[in-house]
Amino acid sequence: MPVSTCVFDAYGTLFDVTAAARDAAADPAFPELETTWTQLAAQWRLKQLEYTWLRALSNRHTDFWQVTQDGLDWALEAAGLADRPALRQRLLDLYWQLAAYPEVRAVLDTLKEAGLNTAILSNGSPDMLNGAVHSAGIGPLLDDVLSVETVGIFKPAPQVYDLVVTRFGVAPDEVLFVSSNGWDAGCAADFGFTTAWVNRAGQPVDKLPGQPDFILDDLTRIPEIALSR
């Protein structure tokens, strides 16, 4: 069936998750980040994701803000910066105003002009997502912002992807799902969505039962793909 609904992961897909560490590194108050911020950002993101999977498997759900803090605490300790409360607070504050990638607004504009439903489907808690959407100024271009908090488990649990089907009353094959996480795109494909993996880092494809239908460098081609299905 033709695509009627285009759904985006949030963190790393629409919003640059490295922006908090990069912006903190530009602050003269935190010179220790000048040469270490890229590693800190990578370890923070990795632990943030790992903690969502581990909590889902162990049935110990908490919201994404808690795992974001837990991941940062691990990364700071690994970098020898656990004793810097001002730095920790600055990084957490910046996470609420992550920069959107430069092509995001134009992509969403084109999808809306074409009459497609647009939404976010994210591990993020509602208040975090609302803060990021407001900061980026893209709220009017989205029909909904869907959080895993509705079902109480993180991706890639199938009930998370089913939130899209329920919300928009569509079949899975009417959905184009876009994520910067290869595992997310693969699991969404296994659920039945058409998927696009935004592989900004040029990583190998994850060895999973589901595989992304499209692999892209950025979001620019999303309208073309959605409207050609």
Image (cartoon, rainbow, N blue to C red):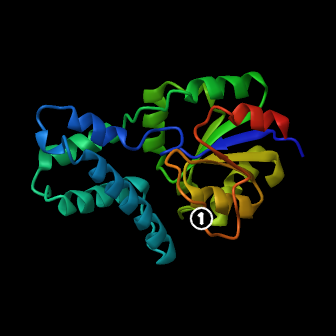
Instruction: Find residue 200 and report its horizontal and vertical position in percent.
Output: 52, 44
229 sits to left or right of 46: right
Which residue is drawn at the image coordinates 18% and 62% (left, top)?
A: 77
Q: Which residue lies most toward the bottom here? A: 58
158 sits to left or right of 25: right
Which residue is drawn at the image coordinates 41% and 32% (left, top)?
A: 99
Q: Which residue lies most toward the right here? A: 1
84 sits to left or right of 215: left
Which residue is drawn at the image coordinates 72% and 59% (left, top)?
A: 189
Residues packed near mark 1 inside 10 Å, few (<14), some (14 to 19) or many (20 plus): some
Q: Is residue 171 visible?
A: no
Q: Is residue 77 above or below residue 198?
A: below
Count of numbered badges drawn on the protein: 1
Q: Determine the image quadrant of residue 18.
A: top left
Instruction: Find residue 14 and report its horizontal and vertical position in percent.
Output: 53, 38
Residue labelled with disc 1: 206
Instruction: Find residue 127 and report its horizontal and vertical position in percent.
Output: 44, 42
Q: Secondary structure at mark 1?
A: loop
Q: Is residue 122 above or below residue 140?
A: below
Q: Which quarter of the rendering shows the C terminus?
A: top right
Identify which amino acid the numbered label 1 is placed on.
Asp
Which residue is drawn at the image coordinates 53% and 43% (left, top)?
A: 13
Q: Is residue 141 above or below residue 184?
A: above
Q: Is residue 4 visible?
A: yes
In the image, 227 versus 117, the foreground residue is 227
Q: Determine the image quadrant of residue 145.
A: top right
